[in-house]
Image: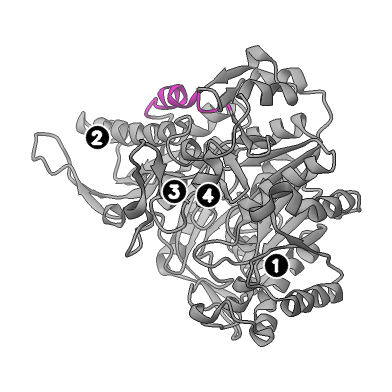
Amino acid sequence: MEDIEIARATKLKKISEIAKEVGIEEEELEPYGRYKAKISLDTFKRLENKKDGKLVLVTAINPTPLGEGKTTMAIGLADGLRKIGKKSVLALREPSLGPVFGIKGGATGGGHSQIAPMEDINLHFTGDIHAITSANNLLSAMIDNHIYYGNALGFDRVVWKRCVDLNDRQLRKVETGLSQEKNIVPRTDGFDISVASEIMAIFCLATDINDLKRRIGNIIVGYTKENKPITAKDLKAEGALTVLLKDALAPNLVQSLEYTPAVVHGGPFANIAHGCNSIIATKLALKLGDYVITEAGFGADLGAEKFLDIKCRKANLKPDAVVCVATIKALKYHGGMPKEEIKNESIEALEKGFKNLLKHIDNIKNVYGLNVIVAINKYTHDTPKEIEFLRKKLEEQGVELSLVESWEKGGEGAVDLAEKIVKLTEKKENFTYSYPLDVGIKDKIKAVATKIYGATDVEYSKEAEEEIKKIEELGYRDLPVCIAKTQYSLSDDQNNLECNEPFNIHVKEIILKTGAEFVVAITGKIMTMPGLPRVPAAENINLDDKGNIVGIF
């Protein structure tokens, strides 16, 4: 059965029942139909003195193009914890339409470890990402309208891009204002995908509505001839943008197929953005459950690094344990095994690929000082010999392995992982960041590149060098860094899977995000507007004769 068929075959509880189970009161819930709802931000005020639950971060090795089942693992773990009598809550990101219609598919888990209603969540959901897109593009319209009516603020360079929540490479660079109307000034512009918009980052890092408005006002949208920043507040745009985002800022409540509550909110990618769900959602979930399972996008070099160095720092959070997800097929892939042979047993390829897993484990344990367990998302073609080899290799590192079958068996397939996580969260940790804030931007980028990626050094384009100098002169030296990098490799070359030779990280562009309060470093060939693959998933998405959606996976 397809994921969508499994989800549709499950009878869900009314969302009011799910809310009641975690202590959300009726007046704090705004239903969007029977099975999804918004949770009022007033819930925080009522629960502010309640003790937080334990926070478990689910991350992964560098994935193959279709991913390694990180969200499926997170959902399975949360369901597994309920199987052993623990009160668990999920805190996850919202899917973007880009991968849903592109190559990666949806982001609601898979098999019997899904959140639902999966079609709604993967498509328009409660409209949060549409609101973010509208807010982003209203700001663009106000910039160009200001220039049209005389440019009193003295825009010489506009740095704010438009966005759309689809993969459309044709929009990476466009010429706007070509109607030849009086006063319209043509200029070069471009689009990001909505999940890479600074509005999305602000949305996920804001602590409340006032913080959201403050951050929006601080967005730098352009510069004068004297290189003086022009902000959204200078345009008097922060109020209108906040109004567009007011309802969206309330977190969304849905459920797993086994009725585990799931707070789903915000959705930045980790390869081109900071890759974590909203601070508001995570903090609310910690008040609702004894164990909160969250995930950060792509591998630990991207999502986990940004979760720990950016989100945890800003929100004063600390994971009580980390799950690093791997698949045997991905390890063999990173060991140089051709895709067409990946289902065949190969201890040699597995041993070579183990180096990738080992790097992520080392980062979590020895850079960040956190306790980690490796969860193997089991496939039918995994052999006992391969599994035992991995178990022994991990024992040598003092790390436990859990074999998880939640795709096939739901929470029952993750009971072993759940039991081990409960014990792991009781162990002492010594959490620290990979860099301090009071060093230069280059020092921070180098710390991530060398400590987390394993690079030898960092090389900068001339433009990136100049931009760093300007940013530090403007007084933003102490911001954290958000590095945009391929998810497929520890290096910035997506084809360098094994990383056997020494490599450098190549920074081609630096972007200051004063609303999000971090500095973006774009490396390698990464683009903030992805493109569709040769055969996009959109070609297989349709309605059947009964009007049901088919083809979303």
Q: Residue at x 17, y 45 (%)?
A: 186
Tag 1 residue? 360
Q: Amino acid at mark 2?
A: Ile
Tag 4 residue? 3
Residue 235 position, x and y percent, is: 37, 29
Label 1 neighbourhood size at 10 Å, few (<14), some (14-19), many (20+)? many
* CB within 8 Å, label 1 to label 2: no
Q: CA distance from mark 3 to mark 2?
A: 43 Å
Q: Amino acid at mark 3?
A: Ile
Q: Mark 3: which secondary structure?
A: loop
Residue 492 position, x and y percent, is: 51, 71
Which of labels 3 and 2 is toward the front? Answer: 3
Q: Residue at x 29, y 33 (%)?
A: 141
Say whether disc 4 or disc 3 marks the residue closer to the N-terminus: 4
Q: CA distance from mark 1 to mark 2?
A: 48 Å
Q: In this view of the protein, which residue sits in the foreground, 536 or 494? A: 536
Tell me if I can see residue 423 in this picture: yes
Q: Amino acid at mark 1?
A: His
- Image height of 552 relative to 155, above or below: below
Residue 544 position, x and y percent, is: 35, 42
Tag 2 residue? 147
Q: Mark 2: which secondary structure?
A: helix
The answer to whether residue 19 is magenta is: no
- Image height of 68 relative to 157, above or below: below
Please state the extent of the stretch shown in magenta in the rendering.
235-250
Q: CA distance from mark 4 to mark 3?
A: 8 Å
Which numbered dot is residue 552?
3
* CB within 8 Å, label 4 to label 3: yes
